[in-house]
Image: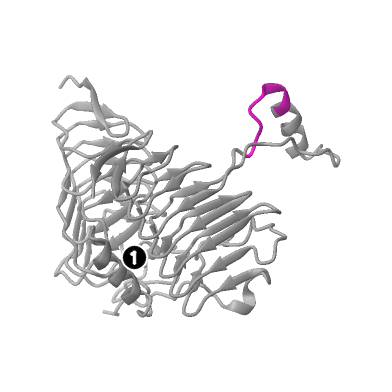
Amino acid sequence: MTFASGSRQLPHDWYPGTLPPNVCVCNTAYLGTSYSFQEYRSTASIGLRIGRGASLCDRTVLDVGPNGQVSLGDYALVSGARIICDSEVEIGDYALIGWNVVIMDNYRVPVDVAMRRHELERSSLRPQRRLENECESRPVRIGRNVWIGFETCVLPGVIIGEGSIVGARSVVTENVPPFTVIAGNPARIVGVLDH
Amino acid sequence: MNETAQPKSLCWTPDELPPNVRLGANSVITGHYLPGDHPFKHFRSRLDPAIVIGAGCTLNGVYFNMGEEAKIEIGDYCHFTEAFLLCELELRIGNYVVIGWHTTVTDADFHPLSPDDRIVDAIACSPLANGQARRAFARKPVIIEDNVWIGPNVTILKGVRIGEGAFVEPGSVVVRAVPPHTRVLGNPAQVIENI
């Protein structure tokens, strides 16, 4: 990704935004649009790292809280996911993530009803209307060479081992061993891959 | 280096809403920036009021796809993110309800079950309909009680009542009633825990 000198605008961006300063993009990576950063508010020293030859395509939304850190490995391809991150979401090298996939390391709201009501009242008074409370988050790690089918949800704390395949529209609630095929809602192991 | 300067998303003011939509104090309906996406593009209800929204609600990128006799009621302090509300009859949503990104709530089948009737319906929906009437299809109100949390990529089908304080995990497909104060997951959604 090459920028005009001193600019944080993407070439050919249809949206008139800029890249946040703490986004570290390799100059061989592809980033579709700055629209992906509308919900991005990480203040970490590096909030998003995009590796060599990686792609973050147009419909992707990075809903990243102040302490959130997202990393996308070399040659990883994200074709329109929603990444909800308050701690850490790591996507390994060569990973392929289908469209409308949700990867979340937290639920954005407290499970406790009284606390949730309080947060909803407070968010209605904020200009951006965001749910911003600190709730428990558990990092998500998607291994190298993992392939996740479209509209899958990956829930907080899940670790998906190297080389595994997740079928379309699965909901991944538990860790996935390396080189397995899982599918379903909730997702179950349906096969093993040779390697 | 510039700070991120993102344009504000579009916000519908009360005088831009259809006349049969009532919006409570400090509630906002924001639109999607993407061209062609509009919350009322498929709003056809002739009831008055057709939509009643309480106070302090944030409806961000919500689609109101409503038939001529459809009615939607939404309580106070609800927070919806890019939900699809497909309504031919009635959706009744309580207070402090959160609905996650890309979730669909529908109170109808939209087409008849019988194969012969579906052929007639397909023709009536086509550009060659020539005024031919559609066939009747099943519709049953959907009721979502107070303090319910619904995750992203969820599907809620007709006739479902979601009990107070229930927690619907991401990606669930809800086909029957959810008891109050339970956590549900899966396709079809099943109770996994009492809260």
Q: Nearer the viewer, residue B94 or A44?
A: B94
Rendering coords of residue B31 (x, y %) = 51, 67
Q: Which residues are magenta?
A: B110-117
Quadrant of the rendered image containing residue A7? bottom left
- Identified at 69% across, 66% down, the residue is B48
Q: Position of residue B156 (x, y in %)?
A: 46, 44
Residue B165: percent from the left, percent from the top? 33, 55
Figure check: B122 above or below A133:
above
**Occupied quadrant, residue A174:** top left
**Quadrant occupied by the N terminus of chain A:** bottom left
Is residue A19 something that shows in the picture?
no
Please report the residue visible at 15 percent of the width from the left and 52 percent of the height from the top. A139
Which of the two residues, A141 or B14, is positioned nearer the viewer here? Answer: B14
Image position of A18 (left or right of B33): left
Q: Is residue B116 magenta?
A: yes
Parent chain of label 1: A
Count of all numbered marks drawn on residues in the image? 1
Instruction: Say whether residue B165 is visible.
Output: yes
Residue at label 1?
A37
Q: Position of residue B75 (x, y in %)?
A: 47, 66
- Magenta segment includes A15: no
Q: Residue at x 26, y 66 (%)?
A: A114
> Which amino acid, mark 1?
Phe
Decide: is A165 above or below A73.
above
